[in-house]
Image (cartoon, rainbow, N blue to C red):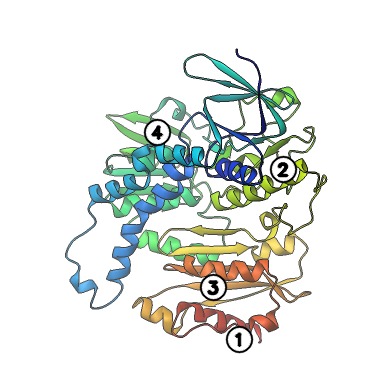
Amino acid sequence: MSEVKTTDVLIIGAGAVGENVAGRVTEKGLSAVLVEADLVGGECSYWACMPSKALLRPGTILNAARAVAGAREAITGSLDPQQVLARRTSFTSDWDDSSQEEWVASAGITLDRGWATISGEREVTVSHKDGTKTRYRATHAVVLATGSTPTVPPIDGLADLDYWTTREATSAAAVPASLAVLGGGVAGVELAQAYSRLGSEVTVIARSGILGNYPKEATDLVLEALRAEGITILTDTATSAVRKKDGMFLLDVGDGRTVTAERLLVSTGRHPHTDGLGLEDLGLDVRKIVSDATGRVPDAGGWLYAVGDAGGRVQLTHQGKYEARMTGDAIAARANGTLGDSAEDWSPYAATADDVAVPQVVFTDPEIAMVGRTLEQARKDGVNASETSLPIAVGGSALHGDDYKGWAQIVVDEDRKVLVGVTFAGPEVSEMLHSATIAVVGEVPMHRLWHAVPAYPTVSEVWLRLLEKYGM
């Protein structure tokens, strides 16, 4: 092993989150080393956000055209699966990260390809494919940006089979004739609809309901749409065993029922990818790491940070990138002595939005777009909250589609008279979400929000209807 190399900040994981930390600290004048064992750009770029949405988008566009008289009559064909897959592949650069590697170099960041282990205080050892090792000492911080990994349920027989996780589902070279999806969360439901529209016969098997973190009125719209498209959805259904016979997956789902499919997608959640990093030697429980608002890992000496999925706060790429920006700036501020152990809420160094204003979208058709808290979450947090909800039925929605179905809800803190949560459900409502996010983050008073006039005729007119029903 060569002598110890020194850097100001060492980041383990070169996904979108790690790249953002590295970019922020180098912009502030610190040196940074980025360590990655896989593709630079991470899960979102190659196996999650981008390819999954690329698989969904063609079907959404086709369905939108079919929803408008005059356009639907012009449609004479269906989706071309190979063209959809080819377009998906273009968004992953054919799983080639050379352009990302070029960006890292242009930003003045050192890239070391290998597997990182924390080998001491502020010390990281990187093991390379050729058997060599490089040891680094970080002057100011070591940052974990290692993302997450699928959580696989302990179902009898599953571990021995060649099932898909989201990685295989988003990078598949062909569309299976049939697909069973284990799990009713966002990724499983999105991919179920994508593959159904590409020609697969799809069955979703969920232990409880689907999309359980969202208001029921919103998820019911999605459930209705999925079933109308021919997707079988088995809720409140436990899978006791899985096996293969004649090349087909057979899932035992109780009451003597069996689901048979050519492919099986296991999408039952994810957990932080923190195993094998040497954290146990620091006295840390790798399953219970939750960083503070500046990204610091409590009780780890003040030099260890964790952001994105590894930080245990919010498992969303955009939120991880937000945390990365705050953490990078906090590290730089501490390096120059202008920030202490804590940071004020809503300052440039604290990821306060993680707690009260997380935007999230389910990119099914119809979509669900939500920011902040549901009524139940707000009340659990001690907020004196009310809710106002109604179907989306305005001039803009009628123009958008001949049988537009949507739903909207606002959750109001009645003591402060500000929004703490907003949910939209319906075709392409994700593009309305940022206005809601601004209202929640900015704590815009309801009396001032009344003066934000939505353009006519747009779907955003639902804001006016919600405020009117609320009593403005």
Query: Amino acid type of disc 2?
Result: Ile
* Secondary structure beneath label 2: helix
Mark 4 Cα shell of 10 Å, populated few (<14), some (14-19), many (≥20): some
SS for callout 4: loop
Task: Looking at the image, tell me whether mark 3 or mark 1 is earlier in sequence order.
Answer: 3
Looking at the picture, tell me which residue is in the foreground, 82 or 18: 18
Is residue 104 visible in the rendered image? The answer is yes
Q: Given the image, on which type of amino acid does mark 3 rest? A: Ala
Where, by quadrant of the figure, is residue 468 drawn?
Answer: bottom right
**Residue 334 appears in which quarter of the rendering?**
top right
Q: Mark 2 points at which residue?
A: 331
Q: Which residue is drawn at 31% across and 29% down?
A: 245
Residue 408: give its label. Answer: 3
Which of the pair 176/37 is nearer the observer? 37
The amino acid beneath tag 4 is: Tyr
Residue 163 numbered mark, or none: 4
Q: Circle 1 sits on which residue?
A: 468
- The kind of secondary structure element at disc 3 is strand
Choose mark 4 or mark 1, whichever is in front: 1
